[in-house]
């Protein structure tokens, strides 16, 4: 079990690097600071009973998950507000009536769209499950490179490894995902 002093020393030692990593990911200093602070709080709240040698990996995982959560929230927020703008009124009085803007004559395309949306959601869920099955370093490299769209150098800096290691991890992750998804009949 980590003592308060060990926990405090650990958090001080990773603070700057975690902040830099978060800034690389989100490209926003304030959001990066929030992510690091949330990650530190989660580590203290849920894992302070762990031995000190387990803290670095736990913190990295928490930081990665908190960053992914931030991106998901941003994506949802952006989708919500961009979709609400579709309902803005064209009239000069600024009033909006949803019933006037709905067009029920295109039900066939709505059903087809719903089917495609459901199918896409199922495929994405399968992909997410397979990504979770990847070894930790492969998963981390894959998500940073292809989901967060960091370049090889940024990913290497965030992971604390060489660029060659990042390329190797990504290549192995892509091969493993391809094999697992093909086994499930999913062609990408």
Image (cartoon, rainbow, N blue to C red):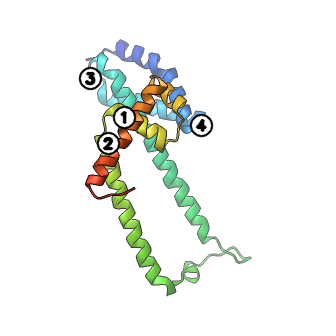
* Label placed on residue 176: 2
| Residue 107 image offset from top left, x and y in percent | 45, 83
Residue at the spot of label 4? 28
Q: Residue at x 46, y 79 (%)?
A: 109
Q: Residue at x 30, y 47 (%)?
A: 179
- Crowd rating for badge 3 (residues with CA inside 10 Å; few <14, some 14–19, many 20+): some
- How far apart, in angstroms, are the residues tagged by discs 3 and 2? 35 Å
Q: Is residue 111 left or right of residue 94?
A: left
Specify the quadrant that holds the N terminus.
top left
Nearest to N terminus: mark 3 or mark 4: 4
Residue at the spot of label 1? 138
Q: Does the CB distance between marks 3 and 1 fall below 8 Å?
A: no
Q: Is residue 97 above or below residue 63?
A: below
- How far apart, in angstroms, are the residues tagged by discs 2 and 1? 10 Å
Closer to the observer: label 3 or label 4?
4
The answer to whether residue 131 shows anywhere in this view is no
Specify the quadrant that holds the C terminus.
bottom left
Residue at the spot of label 3? 49
- Crowd rating for badge 2 (residues with CA inside 10 Å; few <14, some 14–19, many 20+): some
Q: Does the CB distance between marks 3 and 2 fall below 8 Å?
A: no
């Amino acid at each position: 079990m980590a003592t308060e002093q060990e926990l405090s020393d650990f958090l001080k030692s990773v603070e700057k690097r975690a902040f830099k990593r978060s800034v690389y990911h989100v490209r926003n200093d304030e959001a990066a600071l929030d992510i690091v602070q949330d990650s530190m709080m989660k580590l203290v709240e849920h894992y302070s009973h762990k031995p000190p040698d387990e803290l670095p990996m736990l913190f990295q995982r928490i930081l990665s998950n908190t960053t992914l959560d931030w991106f998901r929230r941003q994506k949802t927020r952006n989708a919500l507000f961009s979709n609400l703008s579709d309902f803005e009124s064209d009239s000069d009085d600024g009033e909006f009536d949803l019933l006037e803007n709905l067009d029920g004559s295109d039900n066939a395309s709505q059903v087809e769209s719903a089917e495609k949306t459901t199918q896409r959601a199922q495929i994405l869920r399968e992909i997410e499950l397979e990504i979770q099955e990847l070894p930790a370093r492969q998963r981390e490299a894959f998500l940073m490179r292809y989901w967060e769209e960091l370049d090889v150098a940024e990913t290497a800096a965030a992971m604390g490894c060489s660029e060659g290691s990042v390329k190797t991890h990504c290549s192995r992750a892509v091969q493993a995902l391809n094999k697992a998804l093909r086994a499930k009949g999913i062609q990408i």
